Structure formats: structure tokens, C-alpha cells
Amino acid sequence: MADNYRAERTISAVFKEQDQVDTVVRRLVDRGVPSDHISVMGKNFQSQSRIAGFISKKDVILGGLRTGAIFGSLFGSFLSLLTGVGVLFIPFVGSVVSAGPLSAVLLGAASGALAGGAGAGLVSVLAALGMSEEKAAIYQTRLQAGEFLVMVEVPAGKSGEYQLLMQNAGGEEIHTSDMTLPRPCPGKCNDPSDLSPEVRSHLSEAAQKTFIERYNSVYDENQDPIQAEQAAWETIHQQYEEDENGVWSKQKVTA
């Protein structure tokens, strides 16, 4: 399904309750939106019933995001439908659970915006992706207050339908933009020319090779491009340092 799905616009909304997020994600999937085009982010996910095997990587995650503690397993019904679940620290927001392509973007080329100076944070990332700073600031503030952000990439001709779906599920501050989240490769990466410009521009030649090797290794295991991208960026962070231009180019010296 995802191979024939052409995402051209992104609809974003905030939800006050986790149950609302569960509802909207399930409705989107039922309407044919591929799970790798849905992103969810929030601080205060509560453990519910476990769904066996819903996390293919490790049982990462979270019982105490409010205090920054990370332990146990991440439970939650709707997250079983999404890909690339992880825990990130975002300035001005704190520790969040993030799932879907947005989490990979936050680990990757957007890291400079997250870690930068005044005004850095989620606002900088979303603005760099084409969202207005005013709307991005609202989303960051409401995430900080414990609410949830949902972003879905959809075909342009169906954006009105999906916007109404999110509104009926309780979405607020709904925003539609022409942006979509960058992916590193359209499947497996054969060489650096397969990398998207957004990813390639933030990696030196050596880092590009490292990224591709790790991406392909994880992709071969599970065919999950978002998890593969997350793993590749984690490896870059472990082995390289960012230079003043936001390029991961300085190989770390290991003892």
C-alpha cells in the first residue's frame, strides 16, 4: 500500500488526551494511511495493556517521562500500529516519546536546530520543514504542557477529508502545509546518490558511507525504513561530531 501512496501534504493537530490519539491513529490507518506516514509525539503516555511483539527493537521505554526516568517497556495500543518508536530529549519540552518519520527527522538533520542556541527546539525543526514559526510555537507549548502532537502525510486531493477526520477525533490547532518529512532513501540505499538531499547535506563522505551501511543492515532485518533511519542516525551520533556548519564530519576518537 505504501508503495502507491503519494504523500504531498502534512496535516498536524494537537490532542489533549491519549485516548483521542489512539482513536485518530486507528481511524487514519483504517482509511488507508500507511503507518509510516503517521507521526505521534507526547510526554505523558501512560502504560496500558501490552501488545505482544509490538516493538521489534528492544523493549525500550517509559514509565516516568515526567521525571525523565526511562525504564521498563512502552505499552500503548495505538503505538503498536506505528514505526520507529523512540525516546528523545527536546529543549523546552523535555523527554518525549516520538513515533513515525518525525522521530527520525529529529534524530537526524534537525539535530543542529534542536541543540542550537536561542530559539532552538521543536519550533526550529518544524519551521525548517516549512511550518510557520507561530504555529510551531503553539505546538511546542502544548507538548510542554503534556498534550500530544499528531502529524499525518496525505495526498493533496484527500487533505480536506483527513483534516475533518482529525477535527472530529478532537484535534485542535489543525494545520495543513505543503511540507512532507524527508526520507533518506526510497527503500534500500545503494550509494550516496540514493540519499535525500536533506540527509546527504548533513553528512561528510565518510559519514554517508557509515550511515548507508547501518541503514541497510537494519533495513535488511525488518524492512522498516524509519527504524533503519533511526539506527543509522544513532550510529552517526556515536561515531561522529557535528562541525560548525551542522555537518557530521569529525570522526570521534575512541580510547
Image (cartoon, helix red, strand yellow):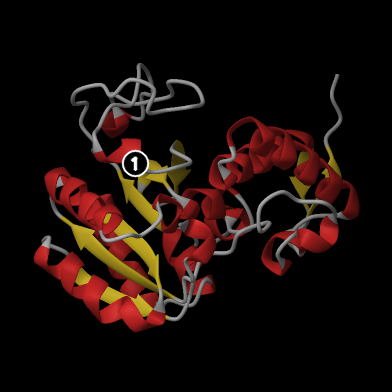
Q: Residue drawn at (54%, 60%), measured in percent from left and top?
A: 3
- Which quarter of the rendered picture does the N terminus lie within? bottom left
Image quarter for residue 203?
Answer: bottom right
Judged left or right of residue 188, residue 135 is left
Can see residue 148? no
Can see residue 78? yes
Q: Residues within 10 Å of mark 1 (few under 14, many from 20)?
A: some
Image quarter for residue 223?
Answer: top right
Which residue is at the front of the view, 91 or 234? 234
Residue receiving disc 1: 81
Image quarter for residue 201?
Answer: bottom right
- The x, y position of residue 57, in whole percent, is 51, 26
Q: Residue drawn at (47%, 66%), measured in percent from left and top?
A: 5
Judged left or right of residue 59, residue 239 is right
Secondary element at image label 1: helix
Judged left or right of residue 254, residue 164 is left
Judged left or right of residue 67, residue 127 is right
Amino acid tagged 1: Leu
Which residue is at the front of the view, 66 or 101? 101
Q: Is residue 219 above or below residue 50?
A: below
Q: Residue drawn at (76%, 44%), measured in percent from left and top?
A: 211
- The x, y position of residue 176, in whole percent, is 33, 78
